[in-house]
Amino acid sequence: METAKLKKFAQFARCNLMDQVSVKLKLVLDKNSTARRESAEAIKQLEGEINGHGAEQVIDRVAYIWFNRFCALRFMDVNRYNRVNIVSPADPGKFQPEILAEAKMGHIDEEMVHDKVRQQIFALLDGKAPSRDPQGEAYRLLVVSACNFWNNAMPFLFQRIKDYTELLMPDDLLSGNSILAYTREAMTPDACKDVEVIGWLYQFYISEKKEEVFDGVKKNKKITPENIPAATQLFTPHWIVRYLVENSLGRLWLLNRPGSKLVEQMDYYIKPEQDEEDFLRIDKPEEIKICDPACGSGHMLTYAFDLLHAIYEEEGYEPAEIPEKILTHNLFGIEIDERAGELAAFALTMKSRAKQRRFFTKGIKPNICVLENVHFDEGELKNYMDFVGRDLFTAPLQTTLHQFEEADNFGSLIRPDITDVDGMLMILKSKNFSRQLFISITHQKVLQLLQQADYLSPKYHVVIANPPYMGSKGMNGRLAAWAKDKYPTSKSNLFAMFIERNLDLAQKHGTVAMITMQSWMFLSSFEALRARVLGQNTLLSMVHLGAGAFDSIGGEVVSTTAFVLENAYKPDYQGVYIRLVDGDSEAEKMEILAKAIAQSRVP
């Protein structure tokens, strides 16, 4: 995908939207503002957020919410998923968004826009309601209604707009210099052919923030939990994703179905050099569980979706049933970044809609878990356990109840003491606390925590990841101390800790496919990690990429290696190793890898 235009747009959009939201913030907070009279509750909420988090953080959050929604609506317009275009004109020769043009002709979707709002829009457009910008105000109401309409199908991205988010919505949405005009220019129909465009936009949107964070690291500033996502987000090139998915999920399927024709479409699959007898047995596709414990915007999961869809088709499943089965049974993503988690869920929803026209009506939500801090006040758990029954709360469970207090800092590296979560969840969900307000609040927190622990349980056939890269120099004090205690053999970098963690998440004989920094292959500080990996697991294949595998961020900055491990020790197994350190660019490395794999298949 051509990314230069996307990068320029996303960086411009961040500055532009933050400026517009900042201006709106001053206007609505003015003591004589209309918002104070007409939206007093929203203003109260806004002032509470500013007092709690600061104006800068509120501006940043609202600016991104609107960037996210505008990009998502544009993608859906281009792919004809909206009944009427929300941010795009009806055809390229026009300029005005189709939904506004239709409203001016008296046509407004009654299901999307409620009657009261519809009357407001018509009053503005007919000149019956006073306004300095009637079309702009009418269009803003239409966009808010569209976002609220999509809440049913995608609540993770389109939360209902009832609060200050609407008050801080940018004013200029219709001019040739509006943010929507630039969105349409950057997100061309060609760019919107694949939902990965959303992931690229997010990486570029936070790229300047990432540079700020690393400039701080150079000055010995530590990376705080709220800045970890910006510092560690890295969108993986598609050819690397294919290598990882095809040699983990694809390999698992071919071991169970040796006659499968899917090998013909897996260009990056490396055939084992010897027959295997000891592997995970799969009777049907629904059994396969795949996890990306640092899923970002979902690139690994979306390609896994494609391959799974082909697997289901080959097994003879009805096409209309397949997307629901994949999202319900197969794919699991974990994140600490709420924004990235929203995009991963959106990407999988778009993948499903592309395969099934009625998917939006099914109410299926992707299994994306954004880990949140869960903290219990002193005495809160004691009262809860006394009410529920202390016999249910084993020592491992009681320990686990305190393991997510810093989930935003430790993320998927948390190893819950309790691993059999399903049984406890079933028991607690059956309890009725409707007449016990305070116990009910604690109950919901316990359920949330256990659901997070369930995602982090060792149940996966395949674990795929491009984990965060962060050396001990950048870690905040709590993270560095925790890493030293919990991951003594890999504590010097987050990516190395994830190698250990991902092996814990995989079942026996499950596969772990990752791209990481190459340093763990050589440095003495990772000697214990290498001993663990080579002494307890099996390296199935490795593609040593070196520098230059990530053109979009300046590939010389990071040298990487991609590899696939089996969570079992097979001392006689002969892995396949491909050296790509001589390639000077992402395109060159991709070509060399494809040729090397093709040549290995020649009898």
Image (tube, helix red, strand yellow):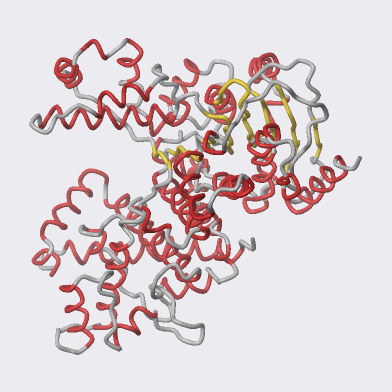
With respect to residue 242, does 12 lie above or below? Answer: below
Tell me: 434 left or right of 587. Answer: left
- Residue 128 appears in the rendering: yes
Give percent across and percent down for residue 407: 38, 30
User: Residue 507 placed where, x, y %?
Assistant: 56, 23
Closer to the camera, 19 or 89? 89
Residue 593 in which image quadrant = top right
Q: Residue at x 62, y 25 (%)?
A: 280
Please name the residue shown 66% across and 15% down the image. 536
Residue 445 in the figure: left or right of residue 547 = left
Q: Which of 239 and 247 is in front in this view?
A: 247
Q: Position of residue 590 (x, y in %)?
A: 76, 49
Q: Report the residue at 80% width, 41% height from top.
A: 580
Residue 525: tell me if it is visible.
no
Q: Is residue 463 left or right of residue 554?
A: left
Q: Which residue lies furthest to the right in this view?
A: 603
* Residue visible at 33% across and 81% down in the picture: 100
Q: Where in the figure is residue 563, as x and y percent of width and height?
A: 69, 33
Image height of 318 relative to 86, above or below = above
